[in-house]
Amino acid sequence: MREYEFTFVVQPEISDDGIQAISQRFEGILANHASEKLFYEDWGRRRLAYEIRNFQKGHYQVLHFLSDGKVVPEIERSARLDDSILRFLTVLANDDVTDVEGRRAEAVVFEEERKKRAAEKAVRDAEEAARAAEEAAQVSDGSRADDDDDDVRDDVRDDDRDDDDRGRGRGRDRDDDDEE
């Protein structure tokens, strides 16, 4: 058995459900060819090195699987036919996997760690969103109390700008001054 990495970039506007559908289609192809999915790596949405089909960002996914190699053309054909996949690349990660069961166990551990990190990230994101909402509420409450002061400051700034505009000689060429 050989281990392959199939990296593909999906259009950024494709929803998570759409990405799941693409992943399930690849898993179905693997199952039909007696190959085994080890795990997925979700690299997330990233900026592309160059624009592809007018997209500057893409959602990166990496599928790790074990196969004899006969499934690779079928997976690449499926990726080529899917318009939502911008680019893909299949790499032979390990030419000869002797301990298939050990590799499966490593994949299970990696999946568990990935799920744990995803749950921790979701908690952090929720905390940050709550903190940001709280700060926004405090800022909006504070700005209502200071509205009178802001109007006076804005008037002073406008007067300063008017003075600056008068001294700059707008509308004249600097070369005109040299000729006189």
Image (cartoon, rainbow, N blue to C red):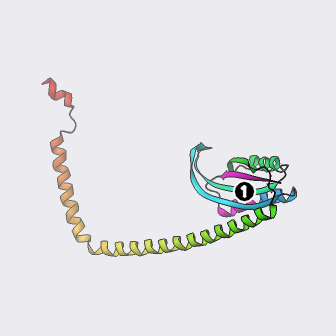
Q: Total of numbered circles in the picture?
A: 1
Residue extending furthest toward the left: 180
**Residue 25: quarter of image:** bottom right
Give x and y (percent) for residue 117.
Answer: 60, 69
Tag 1: Cα neighbours inside 10 Å, few (<14), some, or many (≥20)? some
**Residue 26: quarter of image:** bottom right
**Picture residue at 17% right of the left edge, 55% below the top:** 159
> Which of 23/62 is in front?
62
**Residue that mark 1 sits on:** 63
Q: Where 123 sits versus 17, above or below?
A: below
Residue 8 part of the magenta segment = yes
Q: Where 52 sits versus 177, above or below?
A: below
**Picture residue at 69% right of the left edge, 55% below the top:** 62
Q: Which quadrant, please, contains the C terminus?
A: top left
**Residue 119: quarter of image:** bottom right
Give x and y (percent) for residue 153.
Answer: 21, 63
Q: Which quadrant, please, contains the N terminus?
A: bottom right
Task: Please state the extent of the stretch shown in magenta in the rendering.
Answer: 1-23
Q: Where 70 sits versus 177, above or below?
A: below
Give x and y (percent) for residue 145.
Answer: 27, 75
> Which of 175/30 is in front?
30
Residue 19 part of the magenta segment = yes
Apparent side of residue 89 relative to residue 178 in the rendered image (left or right): right
Apparent side of residue 54 relative to residue 155 in the rendered image (left or right): right
